Amino acid sequence: MTTPEAAIPLWERAELRAAAGTTLRPGGLNLTDRAAELIGVVPGWRVLDVGSGLGATMKRLCSRYGAQAFGVETSLQQIQRASTGSRCVQADGAILPFGDGVFHALFCECVLSLFDDKSAGLREFYRVLRPGGFLVLSDLHGEGGEGVGSGASCADRAGPLSVTREMLVAQGFSVFLVEDHSRHLKELAAKLIFIDGKPRNQCTCESRRVGYHLVIAQKKGLENGG
Ligand SMILES: C[S@@+](CC[C@H](N)C(=O)[O-])C[C@H]1O[C@@H](n2cnc3c(N)ncnc32)[C@H](O)[C@@H]1O
């Protein structure tokens, strides 16, 4: 029996790969580079990418910055497409199979909005970061409308940016940077429309204002590095 296309999440569909390339989200590797440069990734840093998709961020962090990059991804199909080998583990990003204080930085790009319990996810991110370690979050945010936190698409599930910020502070993070990158969301939406001449994304967010942000937060404690 085949799965109806509407039941397949957008990030698993060929149309998103055609529109977005190897990063399944707005902003592409330019946004990854911006974050990597802001936090000062240096060779040897252990960096975890939660929801690593096709592995583009892992590969970039290794090739351009000399980081030891690891990934966690729920979808076996994405892991197979990424071909990043044993550096990517099939696991839920909210229950990370790593010890405390292992990573210099953790990237989570367009994934946190998909978590059922975002606070629990952020608690886990905090746990696996070293003191002074950086969390790079890029994601959709949404204001207004019904059903925030439920629904099938990232846009349906995206909550207000102010709530993400409050959750970060509640977990003990210092918020280092908040930037609006909604322009990249519009660009990706436009590319999706023009792939086959009609919008096929099952986004039900017409009643909501949706945007895209980059947030960098830091775990309290000693300076990162070393
Ligand atoms: C929109 S894609 C973004 C992929 C990648 N971060 C990128 O920037 O291209 C979301 C990815 O998160 C994965 N994902 C969803 N929920 C997850 C979870 N709880 N833990 C780990 N990965 C998850 C999906 O399978 C998908 O590959």
Image (tube, rainbow, N blue to C red):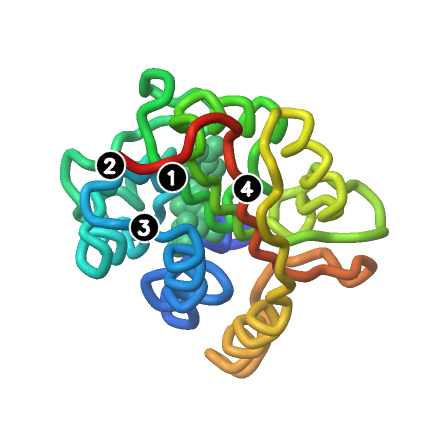
Reading the image, the residue beneath label 1 is 105
Q: Is residue 107 left or right of residue 45?
A: right
What is the quadrant of residue 204 in the picture?
A: bottom right
Q: CA distance from mark 2 to mark 3?
A: 20 Å
Q: Are marks 2 and 3 in contact (CB under 8 Å)?
A: no
Q: Is residue 210 left or right of residue 39?
A: right
- Residue 110 image point, x, y percent: 51, 50
Task: Write the residue at 72% across / 60% down.
Answer: 210
Which amino acid does the dot numbered 4 rest on? Ala
Q: Is residue 182 left or right of residue 131?
A: right
Which amino acid does the dot numbered 1 rest on? Ala
Element on which disc 1 rests = strand
Q: Nearer the viewer, residue 84 or 129?
A: 129
Reading the image, the residue beneath label 3 is 41
- Residue 213 image point, x, y percent: 61, 57
Q: Are marks 3 and 1 in contact (CB under 8 Å)?
A: yes
Reading the image, the residue beneath label 2 is 88
Of callouts 2 and 4, which one flags the residue occurring earlier in the amino acid sequence? 2
- Residue 156 image point, x, y percent: 69, 48
Nearer the observer: mark 1 or 2; the answer is 1
Of callouts 1 and 2, which one flags the residue occurring earlier in the amino acid sequence? 2
Element on which disc 2 rests = strand
Q: Are marks 1 and 2 in contact (CB under 8 Å)?
A: no
Reading the image, the residue beneath label 4 is 217
Nearer the observer: mark 2 or 4; the answer is 4
